[in-house]
Image (spheres, rainbow, N blue to C red):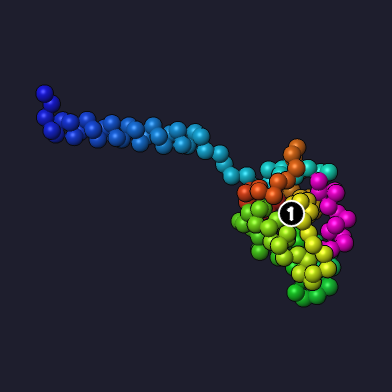
Amino acid sequence: MASKSTLLVAGSFLAWGAAVTFSGVVAQGSVAQKTTNDGLYTQAQADGAKALYNKVCVDCHPFTVAAKKKPKDLPLGEDPFFEEWEGRSVRELISIIALTMPNDGSAVISDQEATDLVAYILQQNGFPAGSAPLDKSAAAAIERPKK
């Protein structure tokens, strides 16, 4: 019969082996988080949102700092956009647009329209299109476009 110390050592090795095996399975099964550089929208989806952007967004949210009409306008491109949104999720941007824009109450933007507008914002910021449309539940992180 084995001594208590032998059983303790054997048990420690079993626990260690299980931990190593489990961590290996988790590491192999984990998927890197998608980002805005991973083709999250289709070209058609982004193109379809251009008219809505021009109708309800462009007056307060141009894509360039030079196109700003009022000091408080937040451009949807260049450094001001990335300073505000880099590291945050696409899903959060979609939600903010759907729930709060336009802030003058001149229109109501549906979840799908907000999703399509984010596809257009990604397109205009130089992010690549993909093969599937952007979904409002996209958890992808916003980052600067890769050159």
Q: Which residues are magenta?
A: 45-57
Is residue 59 positioned above or below 124 on the image? below
- Give the percent coordinates (x, y) of residue 100: 72, 65
**Which residue is at a point 11% across and 23% down the rendered structure image?**
1
Q: Residues within 10 Å of mark 1 (few under 14, many from 20)?
A: some
Q: Is residue 16 above or below residue 37?
A: above
According to the image, label 1 marks what residue? 111
* Quadrant of the image occupied by residue 105: bottom right
View extreme (bottom): residue: 71
Residue 93 percent across, percent down from the top left: 68, 58
Residue 48 on the magenta segment? yes
Q: Nearer the viewer, residue 46 or 103?
A: 103
Q: Residue at x 85, y 49 (%)?
A: 48
At 83% across and 43% down in the image, what residue appears?
A: 44
The spot of residue 126 in percent (x, y) is: 77, 50
Q: Nearer the viewer, residue 142 or 56?
A: 56
Q: Residue furthest top?
A: 1
Residue nearer the viewer, 143 or 138: 138
x 34%, y 33%: residue: 18
**Mark 1 is on which residue type?**
Asp
Relative to 35, 53 lies left or right? right
In magenta segment, residue 30 = no
- How far from the left and from the top, in percent, is residue 28? 49, 33
Residue 102 is drawn in which quadrant?
Answer: bottom right
- Judge from the rendering whether residue 19 lies leftward or rightward of residue 102; answer left or right: left
